Structures are given as C-alpha cells and as structure tokens.
Image (spheres, helix red, strand yellow):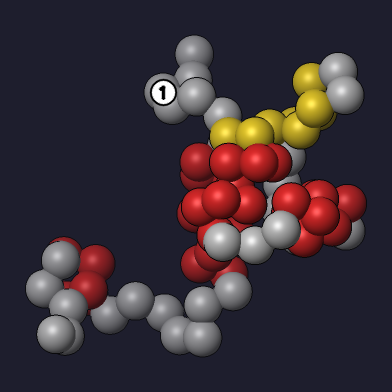
Amino acid sequence: MLSKPMLTIHEVAALLKVKESTVRSWVRDGSLRAVKFGRDWRVAHKDLEAFVESHANRSETPDEIRGGGKS
C-alpha cells in the first residue's frame, strides 16, 4: 500500500512553481517517472524527490542530510 497519496500533474506543477505543460513534457520525455490512471498521470513522492535531486547542481553534504546545513 502507498504510504503517501500520489501527486497529480497540477500538484507537481504547483510545488515546483512551473506550468503543468512543463511537468507533462518531463513525463512525456521520461525524465519524470509517472503512472497513468485512465487519462490522468500521477507522480509518487519518491519519484518527484529523485527527479529534483537529479537536477540539483551539487549533492547534499552529510551535514545538510542531517539537518545541520549552512545558514
């Protein structure tokens, strides 16, 4: 069973502050993993986190992972 409900394209776009068409493009080109239910796409939280991490300009440091990042 899913631990968190999956996100809609609209919700992903709102979280990332981009247009829905941008999110659909990422899904279409395969860079953002999504699951199709009927006519609608859903994105798992873990897949969105992986997508964002893969587009970061650098990896998190061990301090940032533990919550003690730079201020």
59 over 49 or under it: above or below:
below
Of the pair 5 and 15, the residue shown nearer to us: 15
Is residue 36 at all visible to an observer of this figure?
Answer: yes
Whole-percent x, y for residue 41 in the image:
76, 33
**Image height of 2 relative to 34, above or below:** above
Going by the image, does 32 lie left or right of 52? Answer: right
Taking the image as shown, residue 65 lies to the left or right of residue 35, namely left
Which quarter of the rendering shows the C terminus?
bottom left
**Please, what secondary structure does the residue beneath circle 1 have?**
loop
Residue drawn at x 81%, y 55% as measured from the top left: 21
| Residue 34 drawn above or below residue 5 | below
Residue at which label 1 appears: 3
Say if residue 43 shows up in the picture: no
Q: Residues within 10 Å of mark 1 (few under 14, many from 20)?
A: few
Left or right position of 30 against 49:
right
Task: Please state the horizontal and vertical placement of residue 48, each as a whole percent of the image.
Answer: 56, 50
Residue at the outermost top position: 1
Residue, x 51% and y 86% (percent of image)? 57
Q: Nearer the viewer, residue 18 or 1?
A: 18
Residue drawn at point x = 55 percent, y = 59 percent: 16
Q: Which amino acid does label 1 sit on?
A: Ser
Locate residue 31, reporting x and y percent.
76, 60
Residue drawn where x is 41% and y is 23% of the image: 3
